Each structure stands twice: as C-alpha cells, then as structure tokens.
Amino acid sequence: MIHESYYWKQPLLESAIKFKEYRALEGIDKERYVKIEQGVFIGFYSIRKLLESDTKITDSLKNQKYDLDFFPHIENNVAWLNNHKIDEIYNFDKPQSENRHLWFIASRVIHSFIFNLCINQDGGFDGILFTSDIDKNKKLYMLSLDQLIKIFEVVGNDYVVKIEYKKCPETGKEFTITT
C-alpha cells in the first residue's frame, strides 16, 4: 500500500520534463538511453502501484482510455534470438490503433519482452516501442513521446479530493469512489 502518493507522483512530473529535453538531443548515448529506460520503467511501475491503490488516484483517471498505436506481427515467432530484428517481425507499413486503459499500458511496459526507444531524425527521444511476452506474436505497441509525457503529467497531477465508501446492497461488497 502506498502511504503518501506525492512521492510517487512527483518523479513522474520530473521525468516528463526530462523527456521533453531529450527530444531535442542530437544523439542518445548509452548512459542517456539507460536513464530514459529507467524513467519509463520506474514511471510505469509507479503508475501501476498508484492504480492498485483504492484511494491514491481518481476513478476518472482509472477509467480513462488512451490511444495506443501498434504494428501487427508478421509470420516469424518472436524469440530472444530475433527480438532485436523488429523491422522483420512486425509490419511497420500497416500501423493500427486501439483504445486502452492505463493499467493495460503500464502492465505491457513493465512486462515488456521487447522494449526500444524511438529516435527521431535528429537523434532525439521520440517515444517507445514495446510488447509483452503475451502479445509478442500479435503486435508491437508504440507510445509517442507526446502520449508518454501526457500520461506521466496526468498521473503526476491527479490528486483525490474526496473519498466515499459504499456497500453494494446486492453483494454486500464494500468499495470506494474517489474524485
């Protein structure tokens, strides 16, 4: 259980600021690549921990869906021996989109089988490519840098101001409503 959400949310806002700076880079060295990677993974881990708590994120954020682009899998089975050849195992000519909850996105990033940074033409950070072990033979997801920043900022600024405890009259199960 998370005691004080501020300490989980503030690093998300700090990462969003750093990610904006990384877009303008003219090349990403190994050290910076790892810093971005850490920011993304730790950020989505934090998001998922916040989502798991009943009272640290508003219900509207928990129910929010985001557009998530993906590229369909081609014929080869994805394995450790070929997961670096993403242009051969996913069809980048046929991008598609689906609408997913934040829980789905965070879980897929955290449990990624493939994880790569998208680098723009100038050499800066432009987003992430990822797929989990579950989805690796179906699709490769892409989250643009703008979407990534938006998610980190929305979660980082989401504070619950009202908590209601309710009991379902049919089942007797207790639940919370957070706004």
Image (cartoon, rainbow, N blue to C red):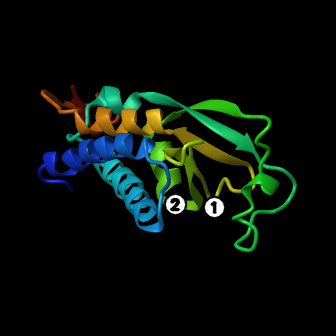
Residue 161, picture quadrant: top left
Q: How many marks?
A: 2
Image quarter of the N terminus: bottom left
| Residue 146 point in image, percent of width and height | 45, 33
The mark found on residue 8 in the picture is none
Within-10-Å neighbours for mark 1: few <14, some 14–19, many 20+: some
The mark found on residue 133 in the picture is 1
Seen in the picture, residue 86 relative to 71 is either above or below; the reply is below
Residue drawn at the location 19% of the way across and 45% of the way down: 10
Q: Which of 28 and 146 is in front in this view?
A: 28
Report, in whole angstroms, how far the alpha carbon at label 1 lies from the one at label 2: 7 Å
| Residue 142 point in image, percent of width and height | 59, 42
The mark found on residue 111 in the picture is 2
Residue drawn at the location 13% of the way across and 53% of the way down: 3
Give the mark nearest the N terminus, 1 or 2. 2
Amino acid on which the number 1 mark rests in the picture:
Asp
Residue drawn at the location 48% of the way across and 52% of the way down: 107
* Disc 1 to disc 2: CB gap under 8 Å: yes
Left or right of 101, for residue 50: left
Element at label 2: loop
Q: Which of 11 and 5 is in front in this view?
A: 11
Q: Is residue 63 visible?
A: yes
Q: Can residue 172 be seen in this view?
A: no
